[in-house]
Structure formats: C-alpha cells, structure tokens
Amino acid sequence: MAHWQEISGGVTAPRGYQAAGITAGLKPSGLPDLALIWSNVEAMAAGVFTTSQVKAACVDYCRQRLQAKHSARAILCNAGQANASTGRQGVLDAQESAEILAGELKIAPESILLASTGVIGQRIRMDALRGGIPKVVAALSETGSDAAAEAIITTDLVKKSIALETTIGDRPVRIGGIAKGSGMIHPNMATMLAFVTCDAAVSSHLWQQMLTRAADQSFNAITVDGDTSTNDSLIALANGQSRTPAITEMGAEAEKLEAMLTAVCQHLAKAIARDGEGATCLIEVQVTGTYDQVSARQIAKTIAGSSLVKSAIFGRDPNWGRIAAAAGRAGVNFEQDDLQIKLGDFLLLENGQPVPFDRAAASAYLKQIADNSSLPPGLGERTGQRVDNPVIIAVNVGPGHGFGQAWGCDLSYDYVKINAEYTT
Amino acid sequence: MAHWQEISGGVTAPRGYQAAGITAGLKPSGLPDLALIWSNVEAMAAGVFTTSQVKAACVDYCRQRLQAKHSARAILCNAGQANASTGRQGVLDAQESAEILAGELKIAPESILLASTGVIGQRIRMDALRGGIPKVVAALSETGSDAAAEAIITTDLVKKSIALETTIGDRPVRIGGIAKGSGMIHPNMATMLAFVTCDAAVSSHLWQQMLTRAADQSFNAITVDGDTSTNDSLIALANGQSRTPAITEMGAEAEKLEAMLTAVCQHLAKAIARDGEGATCLIEVQVTGTYDQVSARQIAKTIAGSSLVKSAIFGRDPNWGRIAAAAGRAGVNFEQDDLQIKLGDFLLLENGQPVPFDRAAASAYLKQIADNSSLPPGLGERTGQRVDNPVIIAVNVGPGHGFGQAWGCDLSYDYVKINAEYTT
C-alpha cells in the first residue's frame, strides 16, 4: 500500500516553488521553448546526468556546479538547441545564460542550474534567449508547472507531470516532477529531462543518494531504443518549506520520502517510455529469482529493449521464445531449467519448457491493452496524460530473492517512419 | 594486399571434404532441411557457440564433445526445429541423431557434431530425421556445398558461401565456409550458423585460438537487431589433406592461415548482416584512435547496432548527431573534442564539432549504395550472392592505434513488418 496520494500542481505542488514556461523564439515552430523552476529559498540540489562521452555544455556546467555547491534556487531549461557538440562557444553560451538569469533573479550565478534539449551541434539562439529570460522570470507563478512542462517538450506527444503528497511528523510533504521524453522525431534530437521539486528538509548528501537510487529504478530502467542522449539530465531540489523535521540519515522517514521520490520518478519514466516514438503500448517487465537487484533489472531491461520482443508485442504475438532468448543473453547466469515466463495472466514457459496456453486469448490480452492505451482527449493541446496500463511480462529465473523492473514500448512501423523520413 | 584468391566450391573446395543437403521433411515448407558436412579423415575441430543462458541441446552437445575430443569427421545440421527449450527430451534427441548418423557413416558418435535451427521450443521431428539421415549420407558429394548451404537456411533470402585459397610451402591451402543468418521471420526463429572447412594441417589448440579470434572480428562484430540466439554456432574443421607442413605454433604461416580464416568468417558475417530482415544495405563502421582493439570494436558495434543510426541510413540521412551519440554511449572513454566522423568520403564532424558538408551529395551517396545493393538475378532460387558494397561510417576518437570494425544493416519498415505480422 502506498503511503501517499496523488495531487495536482506538478513541480509547483510542493511549498515554496514557482515555475514558468514561455515562447522565447528558440524553437522554429513558435511553440513554448523556455522553462524556469524557482525555489523561494535556497534548496538542496541533486543531479543524475548522462554517462555519454559526448555531453552537452549544460551537463558539464551542472556537474561542476553541483560538485562545488550542493544547493540551488533555479533551473533554466531551453528547448530547440541542445548545445551539444558546440565546443568552447557552447560553454560560454551556458555561462552567459546563467549570468543573465542571475542578474534578473538577483541571486548568484552559482545558484542556477541549466538544461537544454534540441538539435545536437546547434548553439542556443542567444538573441532569443537573452530576450526570453526577463520574460520567463516575469511569468513565474505558483501555478506555472504546466507551462514549464509544456516548454521543455520537443517531439513528445503529451506533457509529463506528477505530484504526490505524504506526511512526515503529521505535516504534509510533497514531491512534484515534470519530464520530457526521448522523442527523436527531428534528426539529432534526443533528450530525456526530468525536474523534481520537494519541500521536505533533507541533507544534500542523503538527497543525492536517494535520487541516484530512484533514478536506477526509474529513468535508468526504461528503454525506448537504447540510445542514450548527450543531454539527459535529472535534477531534484528539496527546499525544506514543508517545515517538517530535517532528515539527515536513513530511517523510517527517510525511507518514506525516498519511496515517494521513487514513485514520482517511476511515473515520469513510464510516461516517457509510453510516449516512445510510434509506440502503441507501455511494456512492464518484472524479473524475479536473481541473487541481486542489479541482475534482475539487467534481465528486465534486456527484454524490454529487445527489438524482436518489441516487434512481437506490436504484432500482438505472445512470443515467449523471443522473451526467453532476450533473458538468456542479458549477461546474467541462470539455469535455463528454472526459467518461467508469464504474459499478463498467461503462463507461457515453465521449468524452461513451453506449456500449453490459449494463444488467441493471450493475443487478445495484448490487443486490449493497446486499445485501452490510446491517447485521451486533449492531445492536440498536449495537455493529456496517457493511460499507463502496461503489458506485463513476468520472468522468474531461479530461487533468488532479487527483483527488478524495466519499462519500454512496442516497436511499430511508425518508429521507423518517424526516424527515417525526416531526412536532412 | 590479400594473399589469397577466391575460388568456387564452398565447404567442399578444400581437399578431402564432401557435403550434402536434402529434404527430410523437417520444414513444413517442404524445402531442403538437412545438411551434412563430411571429412574423409578425422579433422581438427574447433567451435564458438552462443553465450546465451538459454541454449539448444545441440550447443551443449557440441561443447561437451569438443571438450573431450578436439577432432571430428562430420557436422549434421537440421533446419525446422531449434531443439531449444526442449529439456531432457531434447538432449536425448540430439544423442539419438548422432548415434544414427554414426551407424550410417560407420564412425564413432564422438566424431559427430550437431547444429539445429528453427522454432524454439520444438523438438526435432525425429521420424523425419531418422528417415533423412541415410538419404543425406547417400547424397554426400565433392560438389555438395551448395546443397548443404541451401539446407541450413530458414528465412534467409540468399545462400551464404565462400572459399579462398592461398599457398603454404608452395602447396595450395583452402578454406571454405557456408552460413545462415539471423533471419527471424517465423516467430521464435533466430539462429546464426556457420560451418568452415580447411585442408591445412594445424594443431587443434592453435586452430581453436585462430577461430576464436576470427569470430571476434567477424560474427561477433555484426549486429542485425542485437538479439543473440539460443543456437548460434560456428564450427571449423581442419583435416590436413592439403599435405602442407603442420602448423603447430604462431609464425608467418600460421598468420597467413589465420588471416584467410578471418577473411572467410568476415565474408560470411557480412553476408548475414546484409541479409538482415528488411535491410536495404550493409553498413560498415570503422573505428580508430582507441588504445586497444576491443574498445574500437565496442564503439563500432554500438554505432552499427543503434536503431536511430540504422533508421537514419534507411532514410538516406547523413545524421552525424546520432552517430556521435551512439559513439558516446558505447562505454569507452574518449575526449569529445577528438571525435571525427566520416560518412563515405564526407567529413561530417571534426574536433567534436560539425563541419559544413554537402548534405544532398551525402544523402545521394547513401541512396546510391542501397540502389547498387539490390539482389542479383537468381533470388527466387536463393542461388544469388548479394553485392556487399557497404555504407562506410568512419569514426576516430583519439590518438590511439586501436582499430575495430563492425557490420550491420539499416532498419526499414519491412523489419517491423516481418517481425510483427507473423502472429501466432
């Protein structure tokens, strides 16, 4: 049973936060393209960034900032140009962005974190950004989360937002988050961004630990097409404005907070996976029976990322052979005679061997999930949230107590169409 | 300059080999489905097999055989049923196959190696196999390579065969090979098989070492969709019938033999990659500048396996951003300012930053490769060999002397169609 409830408000649901999203003229489309998240007080800041060797200037910038100082007050995010593979000029552009914003907000540049998404190899349109920064500051509002969520997306079909509330010491504590997915419709676009706000009082060291673990169980457990971006960033602030007792070490309250943080990250990660290009459904892979969690997650991710499994789900095909083959090549040792595979309620493989099952009914299960997973009204304005009911693939590989999950989406004609037909 | 020439004859080009391929009634299609390769004398035998945890009975069988005895006289391969995920009965079926064949050939069962390809979870149709074994033995011929090459394929569009000749001590030495690809049109089908024959005299230990290294630079350097099979097997025989001096340690002659073995394996591996489902062209990725070969190959394979890169090539899109992003996430450290990317003759990225290039001409280069890469006449009979002129992606990541290659194919609508629409 979850110890929290869903509330509205996204990143501005926790106390002491404002947000804004405006059109600064960065995107050629004229859609909103500049977002700002602002904490009324200095907040503990933690981050998890792309492990790619090819990194955007904002990623290097944030890493250096967070190494020097574990707190921040603002996150500025531009969409349109990724500011990756832009060399020394890209670094200067990032620094200038922070300085202009610091001047507007009347804070030190060291309290500003940056994120970018858009076309790799392109500098940020600095003229537009210089004009946009005062506007986005002026637009800050305690109900600005949706505007910010809209300004950070590029080719996503829907906005991604969540807020949860629990109690610590009888007082409400809230965590909110917004994200954009790895929608890569335009050539060279590929970024996953997520921004999380929290009003608990938590030490910076603990907050970073919690975020790292939460990322492993959420953003690091999804796969759309296996391509990690140059700009992937997850940034989380915790500003203490809930006025709850400070959490400085692990214990019941820390665990409660971390569980809610993980839930926020998992919601956003699943929304990203569901919004994979051309996808018709979300796939959740649950792996049990390993001797540790990492191995279970590794198997789950290999299955969720298999092009053959993804194609089979798109074809509504209960193809256990492809699931077994993906599990087998995940790099985790297990006895094949221990392998069990379930698809929804259908047992497909037991003791490493196929068992009779109703293929038509299993196929109908897959079809029904996809049919019920269509976009709700409001897609045109990108205001809708997708229905997240996933196809469940459950795999047991042995007697161990390890458990891991991963999420992905099916592979459709439209994926190829989207990624092949936007020729330069 | 290569020290060998291409000859005809496939696995029966080297002296002392016969082969056959017949229709035993294993495939529902009625196409040839049982192949035999036979050496007139006991041959040194080496093998490289799938690393999957879910392995076919024939893989376990061969591994055990080759651990006990490093020589063999025959390779029997059935197509139609993979004999994977078939438990104890599958093991018994494999043993019975070897015993029946041993009786027909009047040799010990220990001199027989086995391979299977087809539907995972299905036992071999033993009635058909029992009837087929005497027929395939009767059909053995010194010109039987093509028949064998045809009997091992499942959903491949073309047969895959090669033979090369060089001289050692002024006498001709030959290596031949046949292969089948990871054509996975039918649900649960997924196997890469390659059989190599050689008439050099070489010690079994050295032969295994050569084969392992050759596999790393060929079969382990291709990717169609990243899915490793339950049945993948590469088996190589060397029977000494060239009457050349025995090669028992590394040296000039061993290197010459290994280079030719590697060339045979690379030809077959590229033919498999080119024949990837729905592919319109072969992609060759060449990586330089690492500090070791393994790292270079790892980057090359990551690029060749990227769905985004593959989609871009299908879209004839010179999309360096996706190539850079794939290189960056390959798990190899490099300075992004050292990154250089070429597509054919077009320089796209230098010192980590984009350089101006003629996009239309680069796109035309991709289109021309695909147009010239169509199937030659004879496809209907699966007799043609594809033209293997690849799209070349050349990436340099630094000052090191490491070099590695990988091969793949583009990702087309037809891949999804083939893998999604064969619903069970």
Image: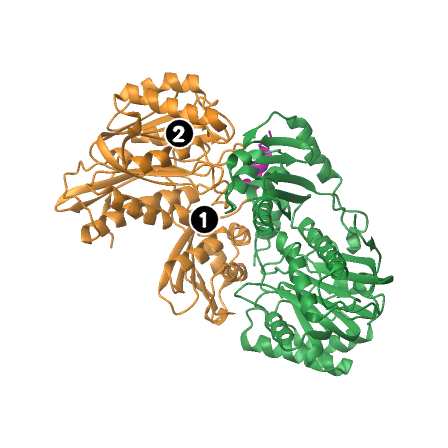
Chain colours: A orange, B green
Q: Which residues are magenta?
A: A414-424
Q: Which residue is mark 2?
A: A381
Q: Please tell me whether mark 1 sits on a helix, a strand or a loop.
A: strand
Tell me if mark 1 has few (under 14), some (14-19) or many (20+) residues whose alpha carbon lies within 10 angstroms of its own.
many
Task: Residue at 59%, 27% (x, y): give it.
Answer: B355
Magenta part mainly helix, strand or loop? Answer: helix
Give the quadrant of residue B46.
bottom right
Does residue A69 appear left or right of residue B104 in this picture?
left
Q: Amino acid at mark 2?
A: Glu
Pick whichever, B402 or B408, lies toward us.
B402
- Residue A160 visible in the picture: no
Does residue B128 appear left or right of residue A394 in this picture?
right
Rendered location of residue B329, percent (x, y): 50, 44
Q: Please tell me whether mark 2 sits on a helix, a strand or a loop.
A: helix
Rendered location of residue B11, percent (x, y): 79, 64
Between the C-alphas of marks 1 and 2, the distance is: 25 Å
Q: Which residue is mark 1?
A: A408
Does residue A72 appear left or right of residue B15 in this picture?
left
